[in-house]
Amino acid sequence: MRKSTRYSLLIALALVAALAVAIFLRKAAPPEAARLLPESDAIVYFNLKPLRLATHFDRTTVTRSADYQHFIDATGIVPERDLDDAAFALHRMDDPNGPNGPVGYSEVFEGRFDAQRFATYLATIATSQETYDGHTIFTIPVGDLDNKTHTMRQLRVAQLDYDTIAASNMPTTEQIHSILDRHRAAASPFSGSSLLSARYGDVPLLSSAWAIGHIGLPFSERGYISVLGLQLPLPEDTTFVASLRYVGTLHLRVEQIAPTDAEAARSAETLNTLLNLFRSIQQGQPRVPADASLRAMIASLKIEQHKDRTVLTGTVPLELLKQLTAAPASPQP
């Protein structure tokens, strides 16, 4: 009797341990929206639930275009209210002058949707439909006619399940098909693209927003990264890991991964020089109360070298985040 009780207790402990390991692995795994993305040059992810809780941006009055309002009326989806997670894959385009420009996008959105209303809306604006792996892919022309190729950018949209939508504006169906293939095998907590497998381990735990890969890609200009008109001394294919994490305050961390320790040291020195120059210019500008949170963030920035990495850290005031999310916007497809 004692032996039977002991075996039962051991089995129960083993099951509890296995469950604890499974929960830990699931927590440590990349978010499902990011795991579904196809191969890409960069990934950007947002968990909008803590952002919504901190800033209440879903209660902000938003100026909407007529097309955007029609989308809301037809589908019942209010993105600032209904989206919970958003993951974007950035693809470098072979022809930067084509309909997509220099960067193409694939996206996965998770939230609360009325699947039937959304499918009905897509059917009314799509120029074609395709069935793949049991899912309907709607193809929708967006943007203006490209004068060079005489074609329009195509947005392909598919509903993966009741709370997940995928889209891609790439020229072929390869990326949207890849998302559907990954969705079929999404039970594994460590599935995903090669970039996600290689770099997600560098993302700090509990990050609400993060980006990995060649994050300079959307800001590239003549082979270098330009932000707000300022050209940084970094090639456009520099690998970054950037994150925002709330632990009492909102922490910003951006890591540049250099080929060698010496190159990381040079980057740190150059970026510190630019940061100090920017602070000097800022100090000479008139102080505006509305800029106080931005000045506080800039004052908190620190650039250091850790072996082959140049690391920028800082604190983002919640007031600044509220200002950014309160800005009127008219999203376009």
Image (cartoon, helix red, strand yellow):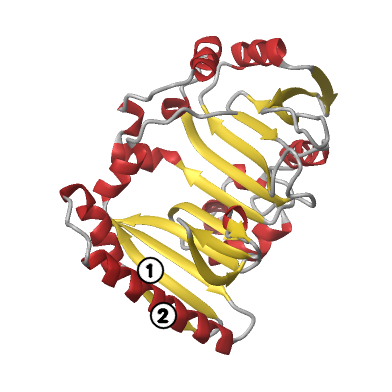
Instruction: Give SS at disc 1.
Output: strand
On the image, the x and y values in percent for residue 160 come to: 68, 29
Q: Return the mark for residue 122.
A: none
The mark that comes first in sequence, 1 or 2, is 2
Q: Position of residue 158 (x, y in %)?
A: 71, 27
Q: Position of residue 127 (x, y in %)?
A: 78, 17
- Cα gap from disc 1 to disc 2, whole angstroms: 8 Å
Return the residue at label 2: 304
Residue 191 visible somewhere in the drawing:
yes
Q: Are marks 1 and 2 in contact (CB under 8 Å)?
A: yes
Vertically, is 120 above or below 19? above
Mark 1 lies on residue: 313
Residue 57 percent location from the top left of the image = 34, 33
Q: Is residue 218 left or right of residue 154?
A: left
Left or right for 250, reference 241: left
Q: Residue at x 64, y 12 (%)?
A: 121
Q: Position of 83 compared to 159: left or right?
A: left
Q: Residues within 10 Å of mark 2 (few under 14, many from 20)?
A: some
Residue displayed at 46% across by 22% down:
78
